[in-house]
Amino acid sequence: QVQLVESGGGLVQPGGSLRLSCQTSRRISNFQSVGWYRQPPGKQRELVAAVGSGGSTNYADSVKGRFTIFRDNAMNMVYLQMSNLRPEDTAVYYCNARFVVNVEGATVDHWGQGTQVTVSS
């Protein structure tokens, strides 16, 4: 069983910054990828940023240049540094860890409980 625990959400004014943290119960090197998703009110969950086991990163177009994902393999932590936040970034943010479960490449996703980020003046 994989456990992911997020922290760092809160209320911030437009233009402000927040750092989200995700503690994983397994070594990050065991995952195909770790990342952050978000679910705005009334909308579907969407990818924000992810980092693969080799270190490659992937960002949603809406956050490029403002958000940075990075990991600390020794501490089994994944972070999302968010800057220049906008009201449209308001959402519940979820930590994700993806495992490859067989030789065909099938994957399983594990999720944290989510942390609320609200951007408002």
Image (cartoon, rainbow, N blue to C red):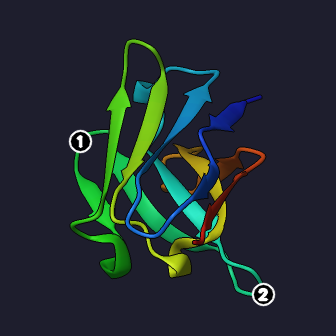
Q: Residues within 10 Å of mark 1 (few under 14, many from 20)?
A: few
To which quarter of the image does residue 2 belong? Answer: top right
Q: Relative to 36, is 113 above or below?
A: above
Task: Please indicate whether residue 82 sits to the left or right of residue 10 in the image.
Answer: left
Earlier along the polypeptide chain: callout 1 or callout 2?
2
- Between the residue at mark 1 and the residue at mark 2, the CA separation in whole angstroms equals 32 Å
Residue 42 tag number:
2
Q: Nearer the viewer, residue 65 or 32?
A: 65
Which of the two residues, 11 or 113, is positioned nearer the viewer here?
11
Question: Which residue bears the numbered disc 1?
Answer: 55
**Relative to 26, 17 lies left or right:** left
Residue at x 53%, y 35% (from the top left corner): 21
| Rendered location of residue 116, percent (x, y) | 70, 56
Residue 86, percent from left and from top: 45, 75
Q: Quadrant of the N terminus?
A: top right
Q: How many marks?
A: 2
Residue farthest to the bottom?
42
SS for callout 1 = loop
Circle 2: residue type: Gly
Q: Quadrant of residue 45?
A: bottom right
Q: Which circle marks residue 38 in the picture?
A: none
State the image coordinates of residue 110 (x, y, percent, origin top left). 68, 46
Q: Amino acid type of disc 1?
A: Gly
* Quadrant containing the C terminus in the rendered view: bottom right
> Residue sitting at 21 percent across and 67 percent down?
65
The kind of secondary structure element at disc 2 is loop
- Residue most extreme to the top: 74
Q: Are marks 1 and 2 in contact (CB under 8 Å)?
A: no
Taking the spot 56% from the left edge, 62% from the top edge, the residue there is 37
